[in-house]
Image (cartoon, helix red, strand yellow):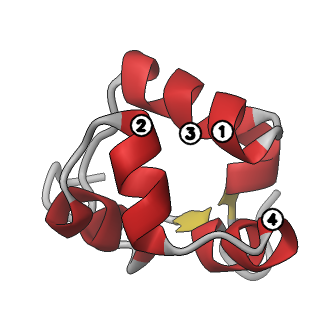
Amino acid sequence: MPPDAEHRIRVHLDHLLAEQEMTLTELADRVGVTIVNLSILKNGKAKAIRFSTLSAICRELRCQPGDLLTYESRPGRE
């Protein structure tokens, strides 16, 4: 797969925020990252996430990484 090809990781930040009744702004403050960076992640435009950021998000949302990120396979492939 070319490095710039569309990735198949889906981010479920909206769902988790709604479950916790938390805003993106509040999460950004708690995690210590900018709203812009969290918005990029939330919209599926991020190319990477630091483990420290992922850990902080999971801590604040009381979730596991697999609750936040899932892999979407291509039709006909697993």
Specify whether residue 50 is in view: yes
Q: State the separation of the CA atoms marked 4 and 1.
A: 9 Å
Q: Position of residue 30 (x, y in %)?
A: 45, 41
- Of the residues under marks 3 and 4, which one precedes in the sequence? 4
Specify whether residue 45 is in view: no
Badge 1 crowding class, 10 Å Cα cut-off, few under 14, some 14 to 19, many 20 or more, is: some
Q: Position of residue 47 (x, y in %)?
A: 24, 52
Q: Is residue 56 above or below residue 11?
A: above
Instruction: Tell me whether the residue at label 3 lies in contact with that at label 4, contact meaning CB atoms closer than 8 angstroms.
Output: no
Instruction: Tell me whether the residue at label 1 lies in contact with that at label 3, contact meaning CB atoms closer than 8 angstroms.
Output: yes
Q: State the separation of the CA atoms marked 2 and 3.
A: 6 Å
**Amino acid type, label 1:** Glu
Q: State the separation of the CA atoms marked 2 and 4.
A: 15 Å
Q: Secondary structure at mark 4?
A: helix
Instruction: Tell me whether the residue at label 2 lies in contact with that at label 1, contact meaning CB atoms closer than 8 angstroms.
Output: yes
- Of the residues under marks 2 and 3, which one precedes in the sequence? 2
Q: Secondary structure at mark 2?
A: helix
The residue at which mark 4 appears reads as 20
- The dot on residue 31 is 2
The residue at which mark 1 appears reads as 60
**Amino acid type, label 4:** Gln
Asked which quadrant contains residue 38, the reply is bottom left
Q: Is residue 28 above or below residue 63?
A: below
- Of the residues under marks 2 and 4, which one precedes in the sequence? 4
**27 relative to 25 in the view: left or right:** right
Badge 3 crowding class, 10 Å Cα cut-off, few under 14, some 14 to 19, many 20 or more, is: many
Instruction: Tell me whether the residue at label 2 lies in contact with that at label 3, contact meaning CB atoms closer than 8 angstroms.
Output: yes
- Of the residues under marks 4 and 1, which one precedes in the sequence? 4
The residue at which mark 3 appears reads as 57
Q: Secondary structure at mark 1?
A: helix
Q: Is residue 35 above or below residue 21?
A: above
Q: Secondary structure at mark 3?
A: helix
